[in-house]
Amino acid sequence: MFNKLIAALLPFFPKKFVWLFSKPYIAGETVEDAIKASKDLNSKGCMVTIDILGEFIKTLEEAEANTKEYIELIDRVEKEDIDGNYSVKPTMFGLLIDKDACYNYIRQIVVKAVEYNNFIRVDMEDSPCTDMEIELFRKLKAEFPKNVGLVFQSYMKRTHQDIKDLADIHTEEAPNNYRICKGIYVEPAEIAFKKYEEVNEHFLQDIKLCLENGYYPGIATHDKPIIEGSYKLIEELKVPKEKYEFQMLYGVTPKLRQSILDKGHRMRVYVPYGKQWFGYSTRRLKENPKMANHIIKAIFFKG
């Protein structure tokens, strides 16, 4: 109840207060902030995926502006020779307004990435978006087989079958590329696993499915049991280190991140930035009230 109370009240607090706990996990408001953070991570051996904050827009004019911002971001970042790619949230481009318009906007971004032989990750959002985002990915991969990937959330009961259902678009030359994460949105028990052990079990089943079939998984977790379980799968299946990567969020568990790097595994860090950081932070807290504990700790540790 305490966590839910904090989550409900937080949007009414001053932005400066919210920034207290948000800033360790967000690169900043500008593309220069994202570039600086990305270069620092590159210097530590990490690849990055850069994300402009924003989602669930209300007009296609916003979608057009967001598309322009992403295209400018890609041109700017590529000039800096950063080892990284880009993540996009379809609702930021009007998925829930006009899915065909959304596809065309994201396609423009993919075309720009292809100019630099780079890659766009289509994020997975809450359950009303799942089918549309899989359809979007399928269409993009048909045209740009090596330049797009998708996110799957292991707490969704449908995920394992969804991964299997996309086997027809996989090839050895352009393997299916998925980020596997637990999932943060609040979903009903009818469609989502709720117990920690259950989610972890299915996470590892999804990773195993990817590795056995030659897909390229991004193992996106800060959870030690999943990391250890992934190590075992990689060893058992004798998977070369260029055939997978680990992924983590910006500012989270840096010591654990370094331990993975020290073992010789590839690591990519999700680098979010943008002026929409306040909405991003408060929405994430509403979706996952357990994060309130981390907020209280952050406030007190910072005095």
Image (cartoon, helix red, strand yellow):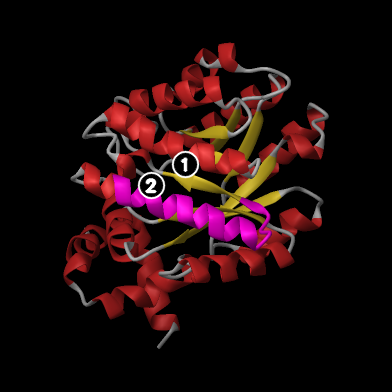
Whether residue 154 is in magenta: the answer is no
Q: Which residue is mark 1?
A: 109
**Residue 79 visible in rendering:** yes
- The answer to whether residue 169 is above or below residue 94 is above
Q: Which amino acid lies under the numbered mark 1 shown in the image of this protein?
A: Ile
| Magenta segment | 64-84
- The answer to whether residue 14 is above or below residue 266 is below
Estimate the x, y position of residue 157 in percent, counting from the top left: 41, 24
Quadrant position of residue 10: bottom left
Rate crowding at label 2 as few (under 14), some (14 to 19) or many (20 or more) other CA atoms within 10 Å: many
Q: Which amino acid lies under the numbered mark 2 shown in the image of this protein?
A: Thr
Name the residue nearer the viewer: 143 or 35: 143
- The answer to whether residue 254 is above or below residue 237 is below
SS category of the residue bearing label 2 = helix
Whether residue 73 is in magenta: the answer is yes
Identity of the residue drawn at 69% across and 58% down? 46
Q: Which residue is mark 2?
A: 67
SS category of the residue bearing label 1 = helix
Picture quarter with the C terminus: bottom left
- 240 left or right of 172 in image: right
Rate crowding at label 1 as few (under 14), some (14 to 19) or many (20 or more) other CA atoms within 10 Å: many
Q: Please, which residue is most extreme toward the bottom here?
A: 303
Q: Are marks 1 and 2 in contact (CB under 8 Å)?
A: yes
Estimate the x, y position of residue 104 in percent, counting from the top left: 37, 32
For the residues labelled 1 and 2, the Cα–Cα distance comes to 7 Å
